[in-house]
Amino acid sequence: MQRISAATFQNLAEKGGGTVDLLERLCVPVPALVIGELLGVPADRYRELRDAAAAMVTFDASSKESAVRLADAVEWTAGTFTSVVRTKRDEPADDLISGWVRARDDADLLSEDELISLAFLMMLAGLENAVHLCGNIFASLLGSDDPLAVWSARRAETMEAANPLPFAIRRFAVADLTIGDRLIPEGDTVLLSLFGADSDPARGGRASLMFGRGPHYCLGAQVSDMIVDAVVPELFVRYPQVRPSVPESELEYRASWRSHGLVALPVRLTV
């Protein structure tokens, strides 16, 4: 993490005092390199994987072109990980996919479809969520007079407010449910609001739900924490004068059915 973070900040420094897109130059490369190395995905695939992830989470059901992009992205990503798994079978390394291949081949703990799906999900979710979590945190902190002090004092609250996933993965009612005075018929889709749960006054001391709970607690939660801590405070230490290049009202957010994230985050590193 330190090696990747330091190299990314060095690349950022080459822009000097000009305007840079913090999303593209910092929030994307650190998660891509960290998660890619953990999984064992070749670095030359990261850009295409990010583009495929974007096509999936910005799918527009009313657009035929968007549907074609979605199908192409899913097919390409599945094919890519099928190829990576094949390579790891022939040349195993010290990475997660090699370990999953051993779990599949030596212990029969995974089916082949589960192996491909697990790699697919970890790269897609890890890259997409970590990128936009960092971007949303920066967007909120850059409007503060002392961002580093705000981050130090309110890290947990800032993380929750910047959560790029406002809803949990959809569920389906397996029987008629009555909640308050509302009936949810059997078979209906249920979307659970993570924002609503974490901002509920009755929450008390319950832990945040942004990474889930119980047996489905996010496998990448600790990595996301490490990525955030490697990039967020370090930016303000290195560039205490960093400021947005456009008013907050002009920041553009993507149209996405799944995640809340910026299109770009232009900043000036120095005054």
Image: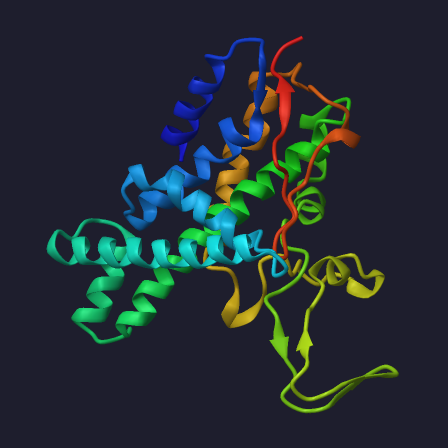
State the quadrant of the C terminus.
Answer: top right
Instruction: Specify the quadrant of the image occupied by residue 115.
Output: bottom left
Residue 77 in the image, given as x and y percentages of width and height: 36, 54
Above or below, 99 against 233 in this view is: below
**Residue found 43% across the figure and 19% down from its top:** 11
Above or below, 114 against 25 in this view is: below
**Residue found 58% across the figure and 9% down from its top:** 17
Instruction: Specify the quadrant of the image occupied by residue 8.
Output: top left
Residue 236 in the image, given as x and y percentages of width and height: 61, 22
Residue found at the far right of this picture: 181
**Residue found 79% across the figure and 31% down from its top:** 249
Residue found at the far front of this picture: 64
Q: Is residue 113 left or right of residue 68?
A: left
Residue 87 in the image, given as x and y percentages of width and height: 17, 53
Q: Is residue 10 left or right of residue 228?
A: left
The count of marks equals 0
Instruction: Specify the quadrant of the image occupied by residue 173.
Output: bottom right
State the quadrant of the N terminus.
Answer: top left
Q: Is residue 96 left or right of residue 182?
A: left
**Colour scheme employed for the rendering of this structure:** rainbow
Pick whichever, 207 or 115, lies toward us. Answer: 115
Residue 127 in the image, given as x and y percentages of width and height: 47, 46
Above or below, 143 against 260 in this view is: above
**Residue found 62% across the figure and 10% down from its top:** 270
Residue found at the far left of this picture: 90
